[in-house]
Amino acid sequence: MFKIGWKQGQATVIARETHEGQYRRGINVYAPTGQYHHVYDYIADVEPDDGSPAFRAKFIEMFKSDVDRRPLVGEKAQVNFNPKTQETSFDRDVLWKEAKAEKQAGKEKFDSIAEAPVGTPAGKPGLAGEVAQQIEDKLREEGK
């Protein structure tokens, strides 16, 4: 959503926790995190794209479905911010496109496993499998 006078920047997520209590956006009041949506409190270091000084922002984001990427601590994400008040929010269009690309990459990987010859290992699942694969690759590079 475009807001007059707002600018864009890159945010590095410093902390994230589940929001407790009601979440208010404008005149709308929402229940806390539940079955149909997730609400998080974020602290992020924002680096404006125009080169103005970086700042630390605290803001709340609600995700109504699983189609958006929900940035984790240490990740970078595109944000929109008001330079006067430093009010900050994630650029949801960018998060949606990133989530869509990740989902497509996962589908392509799944399809390639299905098309592989019988007996071909599928790899290790999940984040732990990715970390294990990175360690194995590093050891292979070092000749161990």
Image (cartoon, grey):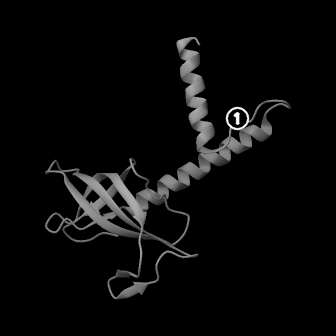
Q: Which residue is drawn at 16% across and 63% down?
A: 83
Amino acid type of the residue tagged 1 in the rendering: Gly
| 53 relative to 112, above or below | below
Q: In this view, does 86 lie to the left or right of 63?
A: left
Tell me the element at label 1. loop
Q: In this view, does 8 lie to the left or right of 142?
A: left
Residue lying at the far top of the rendered structure? 143
Q: Where is residue 100 in the image (x, y as percent from the top left)?
A: 54, 55
Which quadrant, please, contains the N terminus?
Answer: bottom left
Q: In this view, does 110 lie to the left or right of 33?
A: right
Q: Residue at x 40, y 48 (%)?
A: 75
Q: How crowded is mark 1: few (under 14 residues within 10 Å), some or many (20 or more)?
A: few
Q: Residue at x 16, y 47 (%)?
A: 51
Q: Residue at x 58, y 43 (%)?
A: 127
Q: Nearer the viewer, residue 96 or 138?
A: 138
Residue 122 picture quarter: top right
Q: Position of residue 72 (x, y in %)?
A: 44, 53
Residue lying at the far bottom of the rendered structure? 27
Q: How many marks?
A: 1
Which quadrant, please, contains the C terminus?
Answer: top right
Mark 1 highlights which residue? Answer: 123
Q: Where is residue 52 in the image (x, y as percent from the top left)?
A: 14, 51
Q: Position of residue 84 (x, y in %)?
A: 13, 67
Residue 19 picture quarter: bottom left
